[in-house]
């Protein structure tokens, strides 16, 4: 859920010992940099030039701008419990993705970085790459992540490739764009972009999607339109999206406002003030599990549908304290282990969730299996099998698209 999420998410209970609000190496490590081999509960250096394990347990500050803690926090705390000689405390903070770059940049400029690990969707990762905020992880730490690309699901591997070595993909889902609608109010949901526009004009204010720069469904809707509309080049938002930008401007006339994150769209849909919203697999399943959206809600895809995939990443800002580096890469590798990947099924929040292959639902915790069996949709397997998957825009192009949307589409209607 972008990540996104990269994306906002329904409010969760405050985690014990965590510091939740709402949702980097003083020099870049060279290609011959540190590599560690990990045994259960210990770190062993295999190169002389790697940062040494801490002499005393460290406190880690983990910053989440994608809602990823919903999927990984339990595993992160499990790592801490299993490694008391490495980790003393972990502080968790959440914030909207647009706040991330300026916050990290200010801390880096002041030489007082208090963010150790960032969990982010493509939006935050792209902005950080553009501003040179991230420490390069691959291939610098390739020995720490053996067979990384081979172990990924093929679409998750493509998402990893978008990171240019500055992020490690930890969770993946095919995303959307889906239309979620209330069947008791929308008897004949749109089946094409033309029908969606006509429906929106005839039902002004009843369709909603959130600002793409901070919403997984909003971002996926934006990047899925070029495929739905038959634009000349879906990967060129400047010269290849003529139909998309025109469509968004026409659609804008019948949209009341654009919320800053996805949660607001779900709440308004659940309360009945919106009849159709942009959605994704996870944003369809999980709000119904939580009761924010009625279980009766349905989803539809439009003619010409392609999946635009999404993922969450682990990234480390430049400026990280060297004594924390060995612990962080070990934690990241831990989160890619099969048992921890199975936990990312959660309650459908980022459905399916695992980025690593060969992690079936049967491996997931019982509460995840129960929720997905009750609130999941059998048609998702069919849609995933029958429709192509496309990677999102690369980092710089994505940031450019977000800026253009903010300026030309959402400027007067953002809240």
Image (cartoon, rainbow, N blue to C red):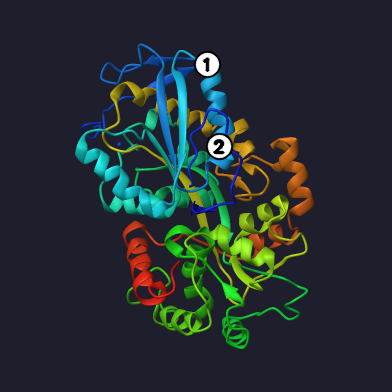
Residue 30 percent coordinates (x, y): 23, 32
Q: How crowded is mark 1: few (under 14 residues within 10 Å), some or many (20 or more)?
A: few
Q: Which residue is drawn at 68% across and 56% down?
A: 292
- In the rendered image, the quadrant that contains the C terminus is bottom left
Q: Residues within 10 Å of mark 2 (few under 14, many from 20)?
A: many
Going by the image, does 374 lie left or right of 98?
A: right
Which mark lies nearer to you, 1 or 2?
2
Residue under circle 1? 40
Asked whether 217 or 231 is in front, the reply is 217
Question: Circle 2 — which element?
Answer: helix
Q: Residue at x 55, y 46 (%)?
A: 153
Q: Residue at x 60, y 46 (%)?
A: 353
Mark 1 or mark 2, earlier in chain: 1
Residue 336 percent coordinates (x, y): 53, 34
Question: Circle 1 — which element?
Answer: loop
Residue under circle 2? 72
């Amino acid at each position: 859920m972008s990540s996104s999420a990269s994306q906002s998410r329904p409010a969760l209970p405050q985690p014990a010992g965590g510091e939740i609000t709402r949702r980097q190496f003083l020099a870049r490590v060279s290609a011959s940099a540190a590599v560690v081999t990990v045994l259960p509960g210990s770190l062993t250096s295999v190169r002389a030039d790697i940062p040494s394990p801490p002499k005393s347990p460290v406190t880690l500050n983990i910053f989440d701008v994608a809602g990823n803690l919903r999927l990984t926090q339990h595993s992160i705390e499990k790592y801490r419990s299993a490694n008391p000689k490495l980790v003393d405390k972990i502080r968790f903070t959440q914030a909207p993705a647009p706040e991330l770059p300026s916050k990290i940049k200010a801390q880096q400029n002041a030489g007082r970085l208090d963010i150790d690990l960032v969990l982010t969707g493509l939006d935050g990762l792209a902005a950080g790459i553009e501003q040179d905020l991230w420490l390069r992880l691959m291939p610098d730490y390739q020995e720490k992540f053996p067979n990384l690309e081979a172990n990924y699901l093929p679409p998750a591997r493509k998402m990893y490739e978008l990171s240019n070595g500055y992020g490690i993909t930890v969770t993946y889902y095919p995303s959307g764009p889906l239309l979620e609608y209330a069947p008791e109010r929308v008897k004949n949901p749109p089946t094409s972009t033309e029908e969606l526009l006509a429906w929106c004009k005839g039902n002004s204010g009843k369709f909603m999607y959130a600002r793409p720069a901070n919403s997984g469904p909003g971002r996926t809707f934006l990047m899925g339109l070029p495929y739905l509309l038959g634009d000349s080049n879906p990967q060129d938002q400047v010269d290849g999206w003529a139909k998309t930008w025109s469509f968004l401007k026409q659609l804008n006339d019948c949209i009341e406002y654009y919320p800053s994150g996805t949660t607001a769209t779900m709440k308004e849909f659940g309360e009945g003030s919106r009849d159709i919203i942009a959605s994704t697999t996870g944003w369809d399943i999980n709000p119904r599990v939580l009761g924010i959206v009625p279980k009766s809600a349905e989803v539809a895809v439009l003619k010409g549908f392609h999946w635009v995939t999404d993922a969450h990443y682990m990234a480390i800002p430049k400026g990280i304290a060297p004594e924390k580096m060995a612990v962080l890469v070990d934690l990241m590798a831990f989160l890619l282990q099969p048992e921890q990947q199975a936990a990312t099924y959660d309650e459908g929040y980022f459905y399916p969730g695992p980025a690593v292959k060969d992690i079936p639902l049967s491996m997931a915790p019982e509460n995840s299996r129960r929720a997905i069996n009750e609130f999941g949709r059998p048609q998702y397997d069919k849609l995933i099998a029958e429709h192509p998957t496309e990677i999102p825009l690369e980092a710089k192009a994505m940031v450019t698209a977000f800026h253009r949307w903010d300026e030309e589409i959402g400027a007067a209607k953002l809240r």
